[in-house]
Image: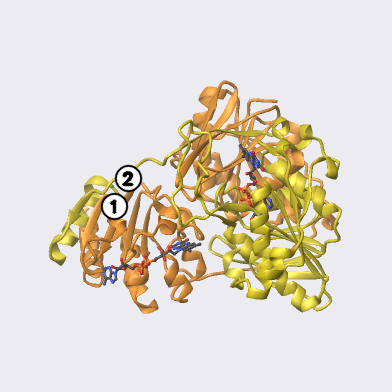
Chain colours: A yellow, B orange
């Protein structure tokens, strides 16, 4: 089975971020960059399919040169190959642009399953997976929390978490899946895995290599533009109550009635 | 491109989802700047009750797209119907609720149409002939303002609880237009085997005005019963931080935060939750935050409008009692 996993490099969510003074983005100096959290689950899902069916797991990323580090994390977990598309013409590309670039790469690779994270923790867009499915002409199952591929590898039955329940969906392969964190527990890279990943050559492609023009996928084609990034409205500590239970109950009740007006 | 504003009406059990109705309010505020009609787009099969429920909420026109193959939601079926309709009618904006269905459908349709897409919008405005959206980014450590550029429709996926529910007694009587639907069963590649409903003691998180959330401080699964009881008294929903989910005390869909749900109720009552940044990512957009924690230094108090230092096991049951008493006096 040929499995493609899409991987994005993002700032570590453990650390605070600094917005640049002009609000155009975040200041990346000193920021630890990691593989998007959900993409660890996507990589794990790919590796498990390979263990079950044989074949290869190929990682694909769109981003600057430094995104190779995120790909190396995936290689260290056990992926076979990694491809990075890096091109200055992608500055200002939007989600559909990124999805088009991913589609162009994946079309050149055999694929039975394409796996993405449910969302990425920087842009939070939840957009690339389904858009990529459209560009590849594949059926999709998003936010997959449970995955069972049939013995012949021709399709899967998945569980999707929907409001108030679980949807059990049958999807034929080749398909695009986006994955939830409850799908699996990602493995840690092994020491030999890390050593191997260090030596592994990561193929780097430009738009030209893919036969794409900046006008199709770059800033000129973008339908959305970030105007500014601002800090969230500050929340400040409010009133504190440190009394006995009766005082605590009275204070909460009064708050619900008089301030929040929900009673 | 037209000036109409469409609201995609998601529905279940013959009733529109709350967020879909909220979007009719969002559409109304956009229409004062944009002009154009507010169109409720209702796909499905046997949707008369849904149409009736939408009818009194302020739409000018209802497009009904009815077909037996739309009986359950599938990406292929619904994307085809919505994309065809948008292509034919060219609305300025299509508003979609940020639900499992909305997030599955909207990007697929946007890609098909080459439409600009903005997701997880908190606010939407029409400025200088363009859609301007604000949305939380970087796990809510920043708010992005995004402009949709270029021509053609735009699809905005909007967070729940950002706009008020419109009154149910609008004098407008929308015209119902039935759109012809052409669908081939073979074009629908996935099939829904079943939808298992997960039993919840209380209402769903995204529909709730008040959310009561329990953390590791709840100590065990059995203790969530006291939160359920308070929730019933308040008409609230129950959620949790991540540890209760990881420990199997509550189902995964309870989780609020970076790797769970984003909620913004009128009141968020955090019980035995310390206030880690990954948790705040999911709830710091709440209107009011009340925290109960026995540790006066818990970071949650830094963001709480009302902080109560105390033992939740003593406070919660008494609070439920007090709420019931207060309600019976109204
Ligand atoms: C206004 C604006 C300006 C932008 N400017 C730039 C820019 O200058 N340079 C640039 O490279 N991008 C740019 N982008 C693209 C952006 O950084 C993201 O890569 C893209 O928007 C994907 O969104 P997301 O990360 O929220 O994806 P989501 O849809 O939330 O991600 C879901 C999944 O899709 C996959 N995925 C997403 N992005 C990538 C990727 N890049 N590579 C591989 N897999 C991926 C992952 O599996 C991920 O888990 C811009 C986007 C916008 C909206
Ligand atoms: C990548 C990543 C993603 C994450 N995503 C999420 C997420 O989406 N959501 C999330 O919540 N977490 C998430 N986390 C975990 C997060 O970092 C915290 O570990 C978690 O939020 C802590 O949960 P808690 O506050 O319930 O537990 P704790 O931090 O252990 O706090 C328990 C609190 O209960 C109080 N307490 C104990 N007994 C009582 C009592 N009787 N009465 C009153 N108070 C009491 C204690 O004083 C303490 O403050 C994530 C972590 C990572 C690394």
Chain letter belonging to callout 1:
B
Query: Residue at horizontal 69%, vertical 64%?
Result: A198
Determine which of the numbered discs, if any, sits on residue B275 in the image: none
Q: Where is residue B214 in the image (x, y as percent from the top left)?
A: 36, 66
Query: Does residue B283 appear anywhere in the picture?
Result: yes
Give the letter of the chain under mark 2.
Answer: A
Q: Which mark is residue A235?
A: 2
Relative to A178, is B164 on the left or the right?
A: left
Pinpoint residue A261: horizontal percent, then vertical percent.
28, 47
Judge the density around disc 2: few (<14), some (14-19), many (≥20) Cα neighbours within 10 Å.
some
- Please give the name of the residue rendered at 24% of the width and 52% of the height, measured from the top-left corner: B306
Left or right side of A176 for B170: left
* A183 lies left or right of A170: left
Circle 2 sits in a helix, a strand or a loop, which is it? loop
| Residue B229 quadrant | bottom left
Above or below A92: residue B222: below
Question: Relative to the observer, which residue lies in front, A225 or B49?
Answer: A225
Q: In this view, does A5 lie above or below B311?
A: above
Same chain for the residues at labels 2 and 1, yes or no?
no
Mark 1: few/some/many CA within 10 Å (<14, 14-19, 20+): some
Question: On the picture, is B4 further left or further right than A171?
Answer: left
C-alpha distance separating marks 2 and 1: 8 Å
Q: Quadrant of ligand 2?
A: bottom left
Q: Which circle marks residue B302 in the picture?
A: 1
Percent across and percent down for residue A219 are 69, 33
Labels 2 and 1 touching (C-beta < 8 A): yes
Q: Specify whether residue B66 is in view.
A: no
């Amino acid at each position: 089975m040929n499995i493609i996993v899409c991987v994005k490099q993002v700032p570590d969510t453990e650390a605070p971020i600094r917005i640049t003074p002009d609000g155009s983005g975040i200041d990346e100096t000193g920021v630890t960059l990691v593989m998007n959290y959900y993409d660890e689950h996507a990589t794990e899902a790919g590796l498990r399919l390979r263990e079950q069916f044989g074949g290869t797991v190929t990682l694909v990323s769109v981003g600057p040169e430094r995104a190779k580090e995120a790909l190396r994390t995936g290689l260290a977990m056990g992926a076979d190959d990694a491809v990075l598309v890096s091109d200055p013409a992608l500055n200002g590309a939007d989600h559909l642009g990124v999805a088009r670039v991913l589609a162009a790469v994946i079309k050149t690779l055999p694929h039975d399953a394409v796996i993405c994270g449910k969302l990425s923790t920087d842009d939070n867009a939840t957009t690339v997976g389904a858009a990529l499915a459209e560009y590849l002409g594949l059926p999709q199952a998003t936010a997959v929390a449970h995955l069972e591929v049939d013995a012949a590898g021709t399709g899967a039955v998945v569980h999707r978490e929907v409001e108030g329940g679980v949807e059990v969906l049958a999807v034929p392969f080749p398909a695009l899946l986006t994955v939830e964190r409850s799908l699996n527990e990602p493995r840690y890279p092994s020491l030999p895995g890390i050593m191997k990943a260090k030596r592994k050559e990561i193929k780097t492609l430009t738009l030209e290599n893919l036969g794409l023009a900046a006008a199709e996928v770059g800033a000129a084609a973008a339908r959305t533009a970030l105007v500014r990034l601002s800090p969230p409205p500050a929340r400040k500590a409010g009133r504190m109550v440190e009394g006995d239970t009766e005082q605590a109950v009275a204070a909460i009740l009064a708050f619900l009635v008089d301030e929040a007006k929900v009673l | 491109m037209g000036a109409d504003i469409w609201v995609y009406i998601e529905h279940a059990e013959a009733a529109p989802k709350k967020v879909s109705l909220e979007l009719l309010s969002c559409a109304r505020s956009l229409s004062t700047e944009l002009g154009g009609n507010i169109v409720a787009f209702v796909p499905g099969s046997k949707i008369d009750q849904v149409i009736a429920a939408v009818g009194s909420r302020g739409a000018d026109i209802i497009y009904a797209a009815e077909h037996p193959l739309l009986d359950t939601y599938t990406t292929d079926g619904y994307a085809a119907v919505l994309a065809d309709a948008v292509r034919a009618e060219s609305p300025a904006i299509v508003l979609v609720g940020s639900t499992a269905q909305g997030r599955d459908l909207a990007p697929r349709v946007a890609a098909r149409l080459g439409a600009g897409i903005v997701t997880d919008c908190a606010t939407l405005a029409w400025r200088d002939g363009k859609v301007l959206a604000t949305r939380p980014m970087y796990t809510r450590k920043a708010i992005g303002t995004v402009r949709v550029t270029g021509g053609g429709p735009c699809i905005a996926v909007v967070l729940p609880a950002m706009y008020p529910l419109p009154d149910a007694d609008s004098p407008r009587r929308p015209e119902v237009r039935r759109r012809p639907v052409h669908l081939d069963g073979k074009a629908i590649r996935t099939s829904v085997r079943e939808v298992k409903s997960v039993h919840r003691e209380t209402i769903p998180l995204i529909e709730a005005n008040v959310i009561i959330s329990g953390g590791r401080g709840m100590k065990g699964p059995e203790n969530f019963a006291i939160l359920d009881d308070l929730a019933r008294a308040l008409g609230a929903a129950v959620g949790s931080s991540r540890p209760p989910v990881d420990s199997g005390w509550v189902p995964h869909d309870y989780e609020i935060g970076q790797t769970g749900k984003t909620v913004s109720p009128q009141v968020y009552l955090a019980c035995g939750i310390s206030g880690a940044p990954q948790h705040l990512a999911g709830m710091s957009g709440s209107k009011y935050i009340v925290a109960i924690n026995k540790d006066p230094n818990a970071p949650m108090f830094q963001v709480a409008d009302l902080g109560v230092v105390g033992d939740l096991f003593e406070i919660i049951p008494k609070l439920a009692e007090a709420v019931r008493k207060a309600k019976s006096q109204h």
